[in-house]
Image (cartoon, helix red, strand yellow):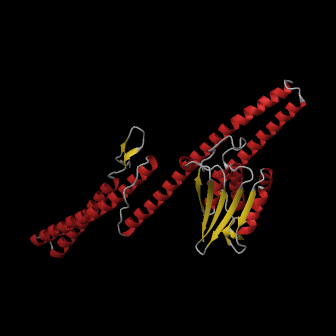
């Protein structure tokens, strides 16, 4: 037997209206058949007990028919309400699948239908969160690839020029050849640093790196970070001072925190004149541990402060031509990935402070 389901189909082939009369028609037919059989059986019973079809039998038959009619109305209204709820759930699911419409507040109901609504809204929330996360990851990946491609153009172009000059024997003097090779080496180092840093940044922001946090004493980490920039400080005759108690400790990933502080110390050294002091101070309490990296350098203008943690943003390209402007962005991702925060204070021509805070 063929079954006809009435649906309204849009031009795109999707069902715009999932309501149909199949269940309702089936309920009506089934109820009428059962009621008719019941009335026939009841009428036959009356005839058998009274020896014929009397006026009393007719009255009883009419009363039973009225009861069945009232029962039909009650049952149909209840059944129709349940079907309407199911159709509403189907419409919600259709909207979730085919559109980006925001759902109205959850419809709280009791019973099995209420549980179904609750589970539906939970599922919709999970799907929406997953879709948003996927979209953010795609945008992030697109931006990362675009940034790397853009930043590699300049050093690659420079390397091509250097190689052409040497291959075509356009530079014959040994000192100039040595200078070209030295600059090519700088460009390669710059590219290597940028690619490695971008990969670290991408892995952190994508959640691919799980920080191995444990209770760490801070002073050895700060001393290790100082050793990592010693060559820079010695070359510029700058002095690093560390003011941190030996007992200061909190939960962090020691290796990643050291790398973040090294980036801040490099930045402080780059933007400070020779023979200037760079200071690391620690403020430790029961509530938090706060690390200050202070320099006496050129400072940062107030209008530039909101941008300094952006990828490839550089305040002054003349200070360190080999800088790619990603160190501060990587540092911020590391600190926030471990549950901390970082902010900056600065005054042009006087100082810059980077302030790292870990709440205990």
Q: Residue at x 29, y 64 (%)?
A: 78
Furthest-right residue in this view: 174
Residue 201, percent from left and from top: 66, 51
What is the number of callouts on the image? 0
Q: Where is residue 33 shown, x and y percent of the image?
A: 28, 60
Residue at the extreme left of the image, as rendered: 55
Residue 255 lies in quadrant: bottom right
**Relative horizontal placement of residue 16, taking residue 321 as reference (left or right):** left
Q: Quadrant of the C terminus?
A: bottom right
Residue 133 visible from this viewpoint = yes
- Res 85 → quadrant: bottom left
- Please tell me which residue lies in front, 171 or 157: 171
Residue 207 seen anywhere in this rendered image of the structure:
no
Tell me where residue 119 appears, x and y as whole percent: 45, 63
Up-down relation of residue 172 to residue 75 (above or below): above
Left or right of 198 in this view: 2:
left
- In the rendered image, the vertical position of residue 24 relative to residue 246, given as above or below: above
At x 30% / y 61%, what residue is drawn? 81
Viewer-proximal residue among 44 and 197: 197
Return the residue nearer the eye: 39 or 111.
111
Residue at 67% of width from left, 50% of height from top? Answer: 327
Instruction: Specify whether 138 is left or right of 123.
Output: right
């Amino acid at each position: 037997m063929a079954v006809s389901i009435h649906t309204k189909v849009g031009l795109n082939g999707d069902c715009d209206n999932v309501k149909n009369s199949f269940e309702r028609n089936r309920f009506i037919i089934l109820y009428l058949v059962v009621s008719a059989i019941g009335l026939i059986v009841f009428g036959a019973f009356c005839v058998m007990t009274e020896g014929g079809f009397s006026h009393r039998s007719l009255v009883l038959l009419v009363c039973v028919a009225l009861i069945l009619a009232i029962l039909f109305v009650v049952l149909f209204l209840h059944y129709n309400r349940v079907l309407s709820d199911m159709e509403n759930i189907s419409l919600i699911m259709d909207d979730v699948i085919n559109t980006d419409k925001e759902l109205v507040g959850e419809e709280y109901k009791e019973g099995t239908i209420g549980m179904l609504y609750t589970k539906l809204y939970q599922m919709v929330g999970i799907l929406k969160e997953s879709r948003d996360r996927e979209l953010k990851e795609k945008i992030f990946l697109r931006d990362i690839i675009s940034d790397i491609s853009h930043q590699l153009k300049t050093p690659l172009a420079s390397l091509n020029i250097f190689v052409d000059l040497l291959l075509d024997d356009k530079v014959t003097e040994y000192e100039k050849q040595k200078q070209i090779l030295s600059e090519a080496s700088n460009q390669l180092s710059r590219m290597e640093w940028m690619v490695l840093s971008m990969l670290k940044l991408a892995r952190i922001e994508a959640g691919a790196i799980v920080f191995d946090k444990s209770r760490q004493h801070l002073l050895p980490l700060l001393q290790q970070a100082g050793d990592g920039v010693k060559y820079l400080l010695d070359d510029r005759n700058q002095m690093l001072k560390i003011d941190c108690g030996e007992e200061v400790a909190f939960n962090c990933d020691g290796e990643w925190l050291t790398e973040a502080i090294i980036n801040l110390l490099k930045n402080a050294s780059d933007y400070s004149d020779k023979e200037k002091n760079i200071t690391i101070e620690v403020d430790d309490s029961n509530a938090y541990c706060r690390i200050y990296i202070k320099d006496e350098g050129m400072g940062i203008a107030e209008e530039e402060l909101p941008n300094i943690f952006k990828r490839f943003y550089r305040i002054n390209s003349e200070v360190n031509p080999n800088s790619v402007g990603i160190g501060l962005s990587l540092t911020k991702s590391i600190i926030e990935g471990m549950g901390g925060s970082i902010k900056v204070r600065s005054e042009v021509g006087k100082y810059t402070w980077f302030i790292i805070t870990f709440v205990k």
